[in-house]
Image: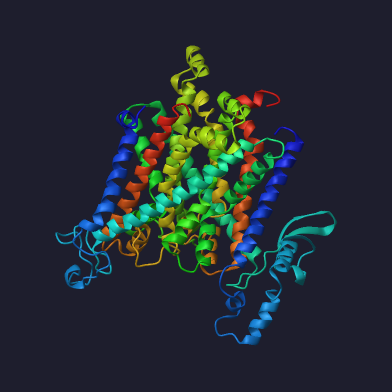
Amino acid sequence: MSFRAALRKHRSLRWGFILVILVVVFSVVGPWLTPHDAFMSNPERAMTREFLPVGPSREYPLGADRLFRDMLARLALGGRLSLLIGVVASAIAATLGGLVGVVSGYFAGKKWTGLVDSGLMRLVDVGLSFPFLLLVMAIGAMLERTTVTSLLVTLGFTGWLGTARVVRAKTLTVRDLDYIVAARALGQRRILILWKHILPNVAGPLLVSATLSIGQMILTESVLSYLGVGISPPAPTWGAMLYEGQDSYTLAPWLLACPAMAIVSTVLGFNLVGEGLRDVLDPRG
Amino acid sequence: MNSFAGIFRRVLSALVVVFSVASVSFFLLATLPGDPARMVAGPQARPEDLARIRKELQLDKPLVARYGLFVKKLVHLGKGAGVAAHQDCGRASPLPGGYELHFNLGKSYQHNTPVAKEIATRFPRSVGLAVAGIFVQLLIGIVLGSIAAAKKGTNVDRFITSLSSLGVSAPTFLTAVLLQYLFAHRLRWLPLDGFGDTMFAHARAIILPALTLGLYGAAYFARLVRDEMITLLSQDFVRTARAKGASRLRAFVVHGLRGALLPLATAAGLELGALASGAAVTESIFRWPGLGHLGVDAVLNRDGPMVMGVVLVAASSVVVATAAIDIFGKWLHPFARETPGN
């Protein structure tokens, strides 16, 4: 089934796809189109007589934030950062998880090389028993100042454990398929078997798990910002904006509503796409 | 996993996992920036005080030696109560001969109090919140999931499914803030945050954090119940039951819901394991004095021993929950129970 046919048939995949496209277009193109600069404070025009930021108006469509900067511009720029973090961290996690899962699954249960599998899976067990947030926070505290790069590395290198388990399970079910046994019997090199025969078979679950994890990464970023170990200002991420907005939501509800809507729709979009892909790629499970 | 040996192996591997977590944490925390001696003594401390405290905390010894001491102290046998050498220990289960099992995690850098005791007071509060939260999750999840399964394919089903997609996509602190706004700020029915002094006050204070945890997890449980029920209800034994005259409700509850019990219990057990050590964000927002709040606070203040304590409780509860599900899970499973040697 082609992707287009799947989109037409599968309702949640379609809606998720539309949401993701909207968010991506808004974040990628948005910062060039907004009339104000995201870092430019403008108290003369963006402050009311009560010294509050202006609400949604003609000049500031989504209002201004507490430092009198344009919300729309910040939301779009923050979208770039949040999407970048979600996508790249998930890519790192999917690569690591895929690698570990395929290798581990392929060697599982064999006499000597099986030790590789036991070792890797015990590592996953230990990793999954760690309180994830505390671990990420501790690494953040260790680095003193959180930058985009450090956050990407932290999230990517802690987020692969679940993926590895999923991929390993899938590898176990395909590694003894006849044509793979045949390839082995014909003397195909191990690395080529893994790359050409096993990887395409596990690509589906890997893709699903990576798509779902994009939303999770964006959520985690927002939680880290909330707990005070997110990316340092002035860079706007949606999580940091949400955190800034929550103190004054009774006076200026748009400060909370804008980033909240952005986060929820993005995460929802990626979740729907991920679940839709899972149904399309594996109708039974 | 039927035999005694199987259970023994499972428990052993659980212990190995917890020990590995402790070791990794130890070295990770040792590399945290900041001087623990200065944290204990305060920013204005004299150099000789710093040196004395460094010696007391054994920070002058090499890392490997400190690790050895840490492991030796972590779990050991002690005798009797009130012995000066064991005053920082958390105690458990008296053994024959007057011995007890002691857990010594050292003293908090920040508060200078024994970590084991602090954890012992806070652990029940976190478990309480976890149980309340999971109760809400199961209640909403089972009701909505069953309705969705019964009305499969209709607008009701679609509405519930969309609601649950939305539920898992919202950050918990957003839910928390909205709940606080509605029930504490606007309606003034419930306290904004805190723990309260009396039982009644605790019960009032737990409602909002439990709802926050509950709404997030309910979305997941609703979907789980829906999918399980749809699979189960399409199976032969349900049709047979209907053919033999069982009512639709009976077929639904006795044959459907009961079959969904194992995956539900598994998910709820894992959730309890994950939440027993505290829901960091929810506890922080509602200032619920449990382990999650403690852990976040300890990391932000570079309080190594306290972080270690929370990490260990967290890892142990996850491991215990997983092992318990492995060992006891089959008793809940209607098929596995009756097949010997499974």
Percent position of residue B131, x then y = 53, 47
Q: Position of residue A237 (x, y in %)?
A: 35, 59
Q: Where is A14 relative to B280, above or below?
A: above
Does any portion of residue B164 appear in the rendered image? no
Quarter of the image for the N terminus of chain A: give it.
top left
* Residue in the picture at 85% in, 57% down: B97
Q: Nearer the viewer, residue A186 or B233?
A: A186
In the orientation shown, which residue stands out farthest toward the right?
B97
Count of marks placed on residues = 0
Q: Is residue B145 left or right of residue B331?
A: left
At a point 68% along the width and 40% down the height, the residue shown is: A113
In percent of width and height, residue A271 lies at: 39, 42
- Which picture quadrant has residue B11? top right
Residue lying at the far left of the rendered structure: A58
Up-down relation of residue A199 to residue B244 (above or below) = below
Can I make out residue B305 in this image?
Answer: yes
Residue A204 location in percent, x, y?
46, 35
Picture colour scheme: rainbow
Residue at the image point whose x is 37% and y is 56% from the top: B177
| Left or right side of B246 for A253 | left
Between A179 and B131, the one lying in front of the other is A179
- Horizontal relation, residue A27 to residue B264: left or right: left
* Placement of B153 over or under B103, stated as above or below: above
Residue B22, quarter of picture = bottom right
